[in-house]
Amino acid sequence: MRPALLNPLFAPVRALPGIGPKTGKLFDRLLSNDGGEARVVDALFHLPQGTIDRRARPKIRDAERDAIVTLEVTVTEHRPPNGRFSKAPFRVIVEDETGDVELVFFLANHQWIERMLPLGEKRWVSGKLELWDGHLQMVHPDRVLDAAGLARLPPVEAVYGLTEGLYQRNVQRAVEGAFNILPVLPEWNDAAWLKARNFPSFADALAKVHRPQHPQDILPTQPARMRLAFDELLASQLALGLVRARMRETRGRASLGDGHIAKKIEAALPFSLTVSQRRSVDEINADLASDKAMLRLLQGDVGSGKTLVALLTMAHMVEAGRQAAMMAPTEILARQHYERLMPLAQAAGLRLGLITGRDKAGERKATLAALADGEIDILVGTHALFQESVAFRDLGLAVVDEQHRFGVHQRLALGRKGEAVDILVMTATPIPRTLVLTFFGDMDVSTLREKPAGRTPIDTRALPLDRIDEVVAGIGRAITGGGRAYWVCPLVEESENLDVAAAQDRYEVLMQFFGDKVGLIHGKMKGRDKDEAMERFQRGETQILVSTTVIEVGVDVPEASIMVIEHAERFGLAQLHQLRGRVGRGSAKSSCLLLYKTPLGEVAKARIEIMRESEDGFRIAEEDLRLRGEGEVLGTRQSGMPGFRLAQIEMHGEMLEAARDDARMIVERDPELKSPRGEALRVLLYLFGRDEAVGLIKAG
């Protein structure tokens, strides 16, 4: 149960004074992570992204041009436009003893102007002062105030991110309303730590950021922002620590293989394992042989051979007389894993099964019966594996591919599919160390750094979009020689429909040149149609596959040697690297062409330069974190994983170790959070939405 103390903060924003249902829907769009109602706490956690400094109150003669100033003036003249239907602006002349300024209002209500700026009266106007045609002017002042209004004007005003239809005043009103009902919260941090870091209380830190007295008060490096960031990091690390403690308490089953199946798999390989593959297999097998439940992350760069490591560890489990499951995020990937693993599994005598959401009833029934009877050693599938109807005879190991698509809930759900199930999760997105600690702090980590022998370097080039004809001609020459190419179109303006349209348009253009050699795949196609388009490309019936980012992860066609990424400036670095990793998987010389629209912004330019310089996914991931922030690196904006709202990992990562150490100490000393500080920490966990961790505490 959430502490009653927090209930006011979890009421909907629309319940605050002056918000109402219509504006409330706009707040839902702006603030809600899960598509539900925005809550009061969401308004408090929506930190300002900038400020307007209204402290400059000079005389007109001394006022800085092209800057925001607040002027004390007398209204001397109204100049309304001629004619009732004129579109000319309403101008008001104001002055002080040093000069005059023209206030300009387009399409404004005349009565409102005359009421706000009565002739002969003193007013304070605040806005951007500009020189136009030799005259000083202020177009649509931000504020027009009398003496009472000036007294209420904040000297430095917070500026917030908005969504269409919302205005700064709406967010400011919501934040002030939230402050009015913010309860007095217990202090969950160690007093000595707060003093050493000069951190204010939680409420004072929020007030300092939302009601800045100086523009620098909102900076991520200021004590108030650092305090808020640390609280969020501590909540995250404590939640992960409690999950980890529960996993370690959970009795595992020692699964000891004798290596006879793994040896057959290795004998069927045309190459030897890399050093890091061998090390990772040994680390995982040691976990499986232990009587503690395993929760391990296997991360590696594109093409570093994670799937083979997974197969060898699943073989170890089968040698011990138990079953294994491998879960992929999409049907295309599940089917591909099944097909890639089948030759090696057959060579080693392993019995593989496949289950997806599209199996025919008869097939599915037969698969489920074989699984329950123990006639399937390894089951490959999508999240259909979670369904209650899927029952194993004795599941010992669950392998989850592309971990960042699955949260803590699913990690625990999959582990409940058998008695003491060990869990291995894999990601092909190399993750910076700070993010490993942040999102996967409940796991042990194995890392694959080398690429298997035979992988060819990829020649990466960048071209402006106006040279697209040369690219089309080059692809024509390549497919004449039997080559295959991907052509990836971007997500446009976060719209599924426009995303499809971009790929559809490019497909139709390329069809005019290459006819039925061109295929199309995108996220809105039915599953069967996607599989069919992929299979035709794999068989070489189509040689150019126009796609959206549905091919980003894991798709493996060794014959494809050209990757064209259109509007590369719209993609993040990690995504560009993943897409590039779809080629260079066979013996042919491979190339990646980044087509960009000019002029390039600084961040886009930096991304493209890094792509041209490096194929090291770990370096690229660190750069992506520096350029963009944690959410995009892990795809958390789309996948619903708990991204951060107050902490910026690229700025606050140095506090992560401290938060982790504090969380570890708490879990060791007070695992049930019963001490006075423990009770306060329960409030912290609920405040930051880490409720699932509270459920793991024995005392509830």
Image (cartoon, grey):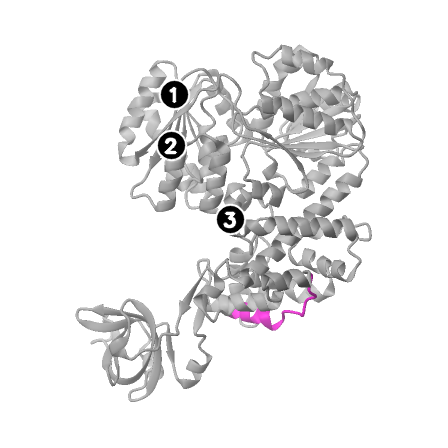
Residue 357: image quadrant is: top right
- Residue 467 appears anywhere in the view: yes
User: Nearest the camera: 63 or 492?
Assistant: 63
Type of amino acid at the residue the image marks with label 3: Glu
**Crowding at mark 2 (Cα within 10 Å: few <14, some 14-19, many 20+):** some
> Residue 541, relative to residue 357: is it above or below?
above
Q: Is residue 368 left or right of residue 497?
A: right
Q: Is residue 184 magenta?
A: yes
Residue 83 image point, x, y percent: 21, 76
Q: Residue at x 76, y 19 (%)?
A: 257
Residue 186 image point, x, y percent: 70, 66
Q: Secondary structure at mark 3?
A: helix
Residue 447 image point, x, y percent: 59, 31
Type of amino acid at the residue the image marks with label 2: Arg
User: Which residue is denoted by mark 1 in the rendering?
Assistant: 516
User: Which residue is denoted by mark 2 in the rendering?
Assistant: 612
Residue reaching furthest bottom? 120
Q: Secondary structure at mark 2?
A: helix
Look at discs 1 and 2 and give the one toward the viewer. 2
User: Rounded to the nearest whole Å, what is the CA distance between mark 1 and mark 3?
Assistant: 47 Å
Type of amino acid at the residue the image marks with label 1: Asp
Q: Which residues are magenta?
A: 173-188
Q: Residue at x 23, y 71 (%)?
A: 86
User: Rounded to the nearest whole Å, what is the CA distance between mark 1 and mark 2?
Assistant: 32 Å
Of pointers 3 and 2, the one earlier in the residue sequence: 2
Residue 594: image quadrant is: top left
Of pointers 1 and 3, the one earlier in the residue sequence: 1
User: Which residue is denoted by mark 3 in the rendering?
Assistant: 650
